[in-house]
Amino acid sequence: MRTTRVLTSALLAAAALFTSATSATADDASPSPSSAERDAPTEAGTTFRTATAVKQGQKATADASTGDYLYWQFPAGAGQQPTVRAKVKLPESAARHGSATWQLDVFDGLRRRQACASGVPTNKASAQDATVTVTCTLRTVRPWSERWANDPLPGAYYVRLTVTDIPDRDLGQPVRAEVEATANDIGGPRAEGGELGAPLHAAAVSEPESGWNGGWFSDRWVWTVGGAVLGALAAVGGYTLTRRPRWTTRPPAGS
Amino acid sequence: MIIRKRLAAGACALLAALAAGIAPANAADEPSKNSPKVELVLDVSGSMRARDVDGQSRMAAAQQAFNEVIDAVPDDVRLGIRTLGANYPGDDKELGCKDSKQLYPVGPVNRTEAKAAVATLRPTGWTPIGYALRGADADLDTGGGTRRIVLITDGEDSCGQPDPCDVARELAAKGTHLTVDTLGLTQDDKTREQLSCIAEATGGTYTTVRHTKELSGRVKQLVRRAADPVETPKATQGAAECAKAPELGAGVYTDRATFGQHRWYRVKVTPGQELRTSVSVGADRAVDPDYGVLVRAVGEGGQELVRGTDAGSGRTDVMSAGLRYPIAEGKKGEDERARTVCLEVSHSFSAPASVKRDPGLPVELAVDLVDAPDDPSDLAAFGLGRGWVLLAVLVVTGLIAGLLWGWLSRWRVSVWRTN
């Protein structure tokens, strides 16, 4: 199991390297393969189609203008609870005319809006603030859901960062955004069965380390196997009780 | 002096024309037909003389930025430069508003030539932005790749007609994947409104520039952005009812839907496949603050199968929704033929009366078909359990089983003894 996963991830990495090398043959800025692993993206996309792919735990940055809609996408697998954090370095306060409200929206691979289970997805920066931070923690990703539900499913997640309310005069000023997507493995309590035919729109993002469908192991194995052992012991105990009744029955009967 | 400048400009124009003539001839070593194209449109109107960018004139700042940009152009990007207001210094509006010329043809960049062409520019005339945008669109020609216009100006259109914002929307609606990014060298409200409007109409971005460094950095970024490979959508036209709807396969499509209009499309899905679709409706003009989008999958009989919806309010670029519809593989002997699923896309954007209705709002439709099992036998992880209740149940069950077994065997032994 483990070896196949290592093999497939190696193959995927090789494929990713190959495709990025071919698509960027002319791009003299393309770094060597080893540093490409480490180097986080420094640009953001401006539409769903051009969303920049980031890995989990990678800190992506982008220079942009106030009012731009910045898009990234990151992968998340079943059993993970993704959290997106974005920090925006605002233009110098002397050039600004009022407060600005920044918002982080997260969509799944089918561009369905995903609820933030916790976090501060909308935050207002006053005219003096130098930075503003927005966060969003999604629900736990499920391996399968009914077609009518919009539960989070394995695949790509889109992040959109933009300013939603600002004095018109402040539009167009330079800002710098930092985005990081991390994921918490929820483990046994939320481990579920079922699977999708394919992760949602995952062509551009790489599979998370624990796989799209989560690992096979969860503490449910421990509970179930432990329960089976205890049940067996209890059975043996019950049987023994009936086999050696002398302790309990002899004294009143004997004389 | 002026004559000499004119001569130089003329020579450059001649060079440019020659280059334009030569470029198609050696098409063999040109980048592929679908390589991205960018045209920089620079305002060379009289107001560019103002010295308010890092102590130098706007024109000098723009020229300096252009030199840096030309140096940094990725090799697979075909770059062109167009000017507006560069040639006619007079007061005749008629002439001044048709003053926009291609300075450097769209193609692989010869850095020396391009820089020489930019160096000849002197702030001169009017600001016919709308006219220049049309010219730039023509320069970029059609073709498969991304097409991007980067407009750098220091003032609003001084010609009025055509309204540059309408021109931008009209160009975007031609379905040729055109994006216009705008950079304003001044901070006045009218310029900002106009440039924002142009950018919004084409899905581009608007930036105000205060420093030379910002200008070159931003233009470089926009040119690089054009080089990113993107799947270009195919144009389609949805119908008013399912029966007449176009049939779509997997892919990305664009369409236009005006206010209050819904669009139907059809997709063939074979049993064992899952239909996945995402819809984005863009707000490319001033719209009322509350809006929504709805996509429904409807069966051939007209019954709704599943729907995706979203609503919002406030500033937005697009409104998106999506759905997935798996069709389980039939048992043997059942109908294995592909089913037709109709997709209905509608939106509830509305706009103030002053806003133009045509062309409609841009609709992007992504259709995907994947092989999908949709019959999980058990929603628990491998059927495993967890928790104290489970343990208690197992232990009590074991205990009861042990006791029963013990009593049963005692009873059997006593029965055997008595016999």
Image: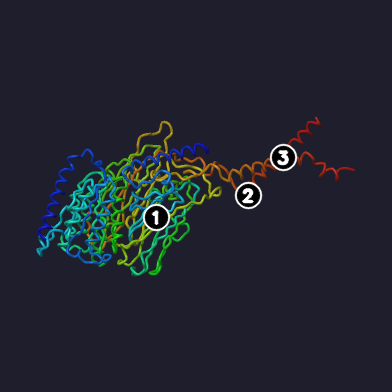
Above or below: residue B116 compared with residue A120: above
Q: Please give left or right for residue B182 compared with residue A81 in the image.
A: left
Q: Hey, what amino acid is under mark 3?
A: Val
Mark in the foreground, 1 or 2: 1
Above or below: residue B338 compared with residue A108: above
Quick one: which residue is furthest to the right in this view?
A255
Q: Chain of mark 3?
A: A
Mark in the foreground, 1 or 3: 1
Above or below: residue B107 compared with residue B128: above
Q: Hey, what amino acid is under mark 2?
A: Trp
Percent of width and height locating residue B189: 25, 67
Which one is in front, B294 or A87?
A87
Q: In 3D space, how far apart are the residues under numbered discs 1 and 3 (Cα atoms)?
A: 63 Å
Q: Please give left or right for residue A130 compared with residue A192 in the image.
A: left
Which one is in front, B15 or B305?
B15
Mark 2, secondary structure of its residue: helix
Residue position for label 2:
B388
Query: Mark number for residue A236?
Result: 3
Percent of width and height locating residue A162: 36, 59
What crowding class fits label 1: few (fewer than 14 Cα within 10 Å), some (14-19), or many (20 or more)?
Answer: some
